[in-house]
Image (tube, rainbow, N blue to C red):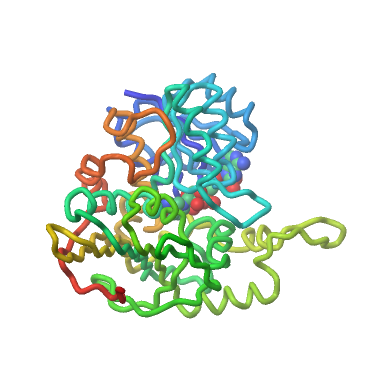
Amino acid sequence: MSKVLIIGAGGVGNVVVRKCAREKDVFSEIMLASRTLAKCDAIAATTPEQKIQTTRVDADNVSELAQLIEKFKPELVINVALPYQDLPIMDACLATGVHYMDTANYEPKDEAKFEYSWQWAYHQRFKDKGIMALLGCGFDPGVTQAYTAYAAKHHFDEMHYLDIVDCNAGDHGQHFATNFNPEINIREITQPGKYWENGAWREIPAMSIHKPIAYPNIGERESYVLFHEELESLVKNFPTLKRARFWMTFGQQYITHLNVLQNVGMTSIKPIKFQGVDIVPLEFLKALLPEPSSLGENYSGETSIGCQIKGIKDGKERTYYIYNNCKHQEAYADVQAQAVSYTTGVPAMLGAKMMLTGKWMKAGVWNVEQLDPDPFLAEIGKYGLPWQEIINPTLPHEYA
Ligand code: NDP
């Protein structure tokens, strides 16, 4: 029985709140705080299971956050605002001695760059204070790391090759929209790609490596190598990996729109003067695009995200594929969200439950693969994200 403070009332926040509200034995009191109170109230109005308290907070402001935490006294803060807010919320948790978790790693607002160094630097201070920070407990990052840890624990003596494959074969009926916060999404995709090979990062021009990959129940989709944050912690925690890559599908329509927007400067994060006012083109573009939380109702199709691994078991070569497929319409029927918000919010709720029930509780700053995957994967199916595994499939990759 714990009090939790959830910060961020967007697409993911909606899922986390609704899922937590149904687990009253664990989350006995819930407060939802975000920049726009009306969005918190709209979500709170959808949970007959328990009353959600709401308030406004500026999560960039550490003292405002600390005051809110002191007043509400939660055991855990679930951060599903934006990556820019990770450090202020971690600072407020440290100041007040409260556990922390999030679904995306810190990114400075004025530089499109994300990495764990800033958050890992809090490890000793969290440990000394006796509190835990769980980093990146959505789907990817999040479940993909639990999948990899599960493979290492049960199926391999040594893992050598990891390919995380992420397909959204859904159709939301819009010309162009992003499935999570447009600003964060476009910053991620327009950066140079990067993957791990033989002990070093290989940087490649954005979207320059691609090929069709066949996804279960979906078929072949063109998939592109991107840098994704969980690669950074996975190669550190599984040092036998010779290569680790992340692949994501994009439709031609999405890429055409993105190219045009990039070519005309609309994805830039450098402020420009417009009629005497400083505006950031990408922030302006975000204001024009549909909110991720609004895409659910007419979304058809499904996502498929998983890990394809090659390595050694009992002296023999082994391949392994573990994945989840999630239908947009089923996610909508459960919590009025599309599958990308859903596949992020469900693991966030379950990660919080793992912490609060003691299964994952330890002081310090941790990534998902550093925790026991078994209790997490034993429960995730019942919350809507069942997984499948295939031992010794033919995988669509070349190996040295
Ligand atoms: P949204 O843009 O829909 O929601 C973000 C919410 O945070 C909004 O309610 C916004 O308020 C609020 N917010 C932003 N800044 C502040 C602030 N300074 N103070 C208080 N509240 C603030 O994004 P999503 O729900 O799609 O994404 C949420 C997080 O989940 C992101 O960090 C994203 O990167 C991550 N994510 C992780 C995935 C994974 O698999 N691990 C996949 C998808 C997303 P307002 O409504 O007023 O703008």
Q: Is residue 312 visible?
A: yes
Please give the name of the residue rendered at 31% of the width and 79% of the height, measured from the top-left corner. Answer: 220
Front-lying residue, 117 or 51: 117
Q: How many marks?
A: 0
Say which residue appears at 42% left-offset and 24% top-offset.
75
Which quarter of the figure has residue 29? Answer: top left
Q: Looking at the image, which residue sits at the far right?
A: 276
358 to 348, vertically: above or below:
above
Instruction: Compare residues 226 and 400 and report the one nearer the observer.
Output: 400
Residue 210: percent from the left, percent from the top? Answer: 43, 77
User: Up-down: is 325 above or below 371?
Assistant: below
**60 or 207: nearer the viewer:** 207
Residue 35, visible in the rendered structure: no
- Say if 25 sits above or below 284 in the image: above
Residue 316 % position (x, y): 14, 64
Answer with the quarter of the image where residue 300 lies: bottom left
**Quarter that holds the C terminus:** bottom left
Q: Quadrant of the N terminus?
A: top left
Residue 194 at x, y percent in the picture: 49, 65
Q: Residue at x 33, y 32 (%)?
A: 355
Q: Nearer the viewer, residue 368 or 295?
A: 368
Q: Residue 380 at x, y = what percent?
A: 25, 46
